[in-house]
Amino acid sequence: MIEFVPQLIISGILLGGIYALIAMSLTLVFGVLRVINFAHGDFVMMSMYLSYALYVFLGWEPYYSVVVVAAIMFLFGVISERLIIKRTISAPHVVQVFATFGLAILLQNAALLIWKGNMRSVSLPYADTVLKIGKVSVPFTSVVVVGVVFLITAALFVFLKYTYPGKAIRSTAQNRTVAMLMGVNVNRVYRFTFAIGAMLTGVAGSLLVLIYPVFPLVGLNFILPVFVIVVLGGLGSVPGALIASFIIGLAETLSGYFISPSMKQAVIFVLFIVILVIKPSGLLGKKGEEGIGT
Amino acid sequence: MGIKQVAFKIKWVHSVLLLATATLVLGTPFIDNPYYLDTLITILLWAGLAGAWNISGGYAGQLSLGHGAFFGIGAYTSTVLLLTSDLSPFVGMFAGASLAMLVAIGIGAVCFRLKGPFFVLATLAFGEVAHIAAINWRSITGGANGLQIPYDAGWLNFTFLSEKPYVYIAFLYLIIVYASNKYMEHSRLGYQLAGIREDEEAARSLGVNSWRAKLLALGISAFLTALGGTFYAQYIQIIDPDSTFSWTVSIQPALLTIVGGLGTAAGPILGSIIMIPMSQVIRVQLGGTYSGAHLAVYGVILIAIVLFLPRGLYDVVRKAPSEVWGKTVLRSKPE
Amino acid sequence: MLELQNVIKKFGGLFAVNDVTLSVRRGEIVGLMGPNGAGKTTLFNLLTGFFPLNSGTINFKKQDIRFMSPEKLCEKGICRTFQIVRPFGSITVLDNVLIGALNRSKQVDEAREIANENIKLVGLAPFTYKEANSLTLGYRKRLEIARALATRPELLLLDEVMAGLNLTEINEMIDLVARIRESGVTLFVIEHIMEAIMSICDRIIVLNYGSKLAEGKPADIAKNSEVIQAYLGEEYELA
């Protein structure tokens, strides 16, 4: 039993990396727009299909086409923000929740109509290699994910801290009224941030299509643990989401082994409920954030 | 509230809807098309479930997406009691509803401290936990294969050969739910919930015990939803976790209510009358090759309604007479 | 009726309310004054169960009310209005006040009667069936008062009801406050507008930086040099 622990830990960390890729963009968008995008997981699904399509029809490998997918998703983010998200920002909760929920349902079923329900995957010989460190197997694709996660974190950090757009985003997240008074075009910040969030899901999708098969409802597999992560890490806190991703990744792998594979989802949800009861503001979140709708 | 006063409060739209529904139901003895009857039953059942959801989602403003848990509890409790103790589903129905109510109070106690989307997320989590529990608790629920309701026709067994008795029972269910909605609008609890919806802190400073009010609303909502669950079990005669605890069951009542008119008694009914036949038509026309089309349409409609008509179609219908009247009156004025 | 002893409320390191001792006797109209940020609204929040206090005692009608919830306090007889009005926007004026009345009366019809009485008292009768959102600020403030009155309070806390009103409205409000006192309600009032607070209050308490600066009759307070200094730079609002 014990000899499996190192493998479980490594797998847990790698899984955490995958979740982090998705969670960071969700929490960034929430921190600035105060909107929870229920369709976030389906954005990932969409990117996975895009990446798949580019490979199957044009022969472009995901690790290269990621730039294109990211660009397309950035555009998609701008369009959805303009059409839908913008109208939910200061609206009652019903609007916010069900507009993005409706978008999720739409995307899932559009994918079903276009691609049918079969699972599709991209498999590349070099990507399928598994590295072995001692007794522990480490898939190459997962290592890439973790590497990209750290790259993105570093890039986001530099961007948010040192560039003007980054500062504009941070100030809007802290206090949109004051930001407006300081001359920040808040509407543009919203659009840009949402588009960045979408772009990051594009990156996630391109990397993930080499790890998981894609099917219309695949977004659901990601989004539920990711919601837990975002709350655990503290809504709006990107570093919090990063830390929480690894915690949840580990929790999932360990409970999958020590309790049972079918129960690991339940464990995550129970954890979610426990967090909500004990500390709804999460690890690094501000108190009261969980009560915020606008 | 006297009957007379309640009657005066029923506006013309309600009268039309109720009349239409009643006609359909009364026409039932003369119709034998099982497909038609099945659609009617589906509409009535979902209108009832939507109305039940509306009590906590519309009147109390607590948007729960975990109501599938209550539906499932209702369906499974009566069925398990039937299978193990030979208890009539009519009695088991109330056992299930009471259990659902207790569970609802537990969920509310945990989740009510959260606002807006976070409450939604939490209820989603609870719904999923219930779903997973139903799949894994094989000893009670029969696991993923589900349970079969024995076919033994008779009123005591809540099982019938033809669809017609089901139509009448579903209609009765709808009436009960509609009455509950109406009660919400004119009762002390209803007014308090309206205050909570608008501004919970201000309401509390006026003496409204928001905790109790919200729990009561969620409890009633769960109770009514569970009743629908039992009906479903007795009608379809086989239940499994995916058809009862799934999130389709959680989302559909919310969707129907929002499209029809959140927080109104007629809204859920209006939503069901429009959306259910529409999705049936789409499924039949496009189903085979284009499965998922009706859901895609649901998605688009949901987005459109929520962004442009947040009060639902009922709002349009309600204003219509005065606008039409205004136009005819104006037109008859001499230029 | 209301007794505060050595009440302290801290936010982090900041003493919002610093060792305040005061009392309000039944039937009085007591004013609470002080520059912005002096801790007046925080004090009200402590009295109405919105924040817990750090130390000290608060007794209402000889009962310890420190840990009671807002709704419980309303039941006990303390009600408040908010500095920034919080009407139940999308429902009618009548329904707004009705919700307050439901605190005392369990029957909707009876509560509606009480609501109508209070609407008449504050002069909002013409607007009874109008949506609360359609009211101008002055009327919204009255709605806030009517709502609070409908709960049949023994002690009514008014938080800057005159702010943002014009001369005529202020005078009408002063009359209203007098009528409320006549109906038997004790009043504790936060106000910035000097003329108003001087004319209606029996007694005034002045806070500065969370501590009690002065207490006494309006005439004395007006002459108190410390009070004047605290307000230095602020023009007296002779309105």
Image: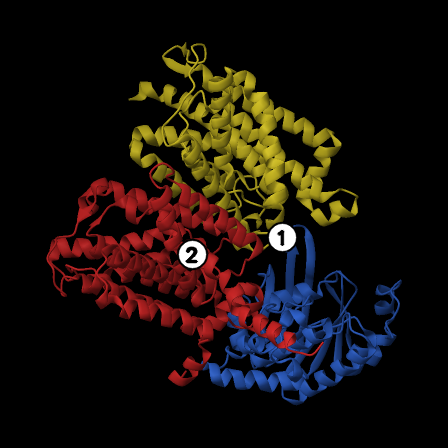
- Residue B36: x and y, percent? 28, 57
Q: Badge 1: few (under 14), some or many (20 or more) residues near its Cα, within 10 Å?
A: some
- Residue B67: x and y, percent? 37, 54
User: Which chain is in yellow here?
Assistant: A
Residue that mark 2 sits on = B256
User: Which chain is in red here?
Assistant: B
Tag 2's secondary structure? Answer: helix
Tell me the chain of label 1. Answer: A
Label disc, if present, on residue A90 of the rendered structure: 1
Look at the image and tell me in which quarter the N terminus of chain A lies.
Answer: top left
Label disc, if present, on residue B171 of the rendered structure: none
Q: Amino acid at mark 1?
A: Ser
Q: Quadrant of residue B293?
A: top left
Q: Residue at x 47, y 46 (%)?
A: B299
* Colouring rule applied to residues: by chain
Residue A27 visible? The answer is yes
Seen from the viewer's position, the closer of residues A274 and A231 is A231
Q: Residue at x 53, y 61 (%)?
A: B311
Seen from the viewer's position, the closer of residues C174 and B299 is B299
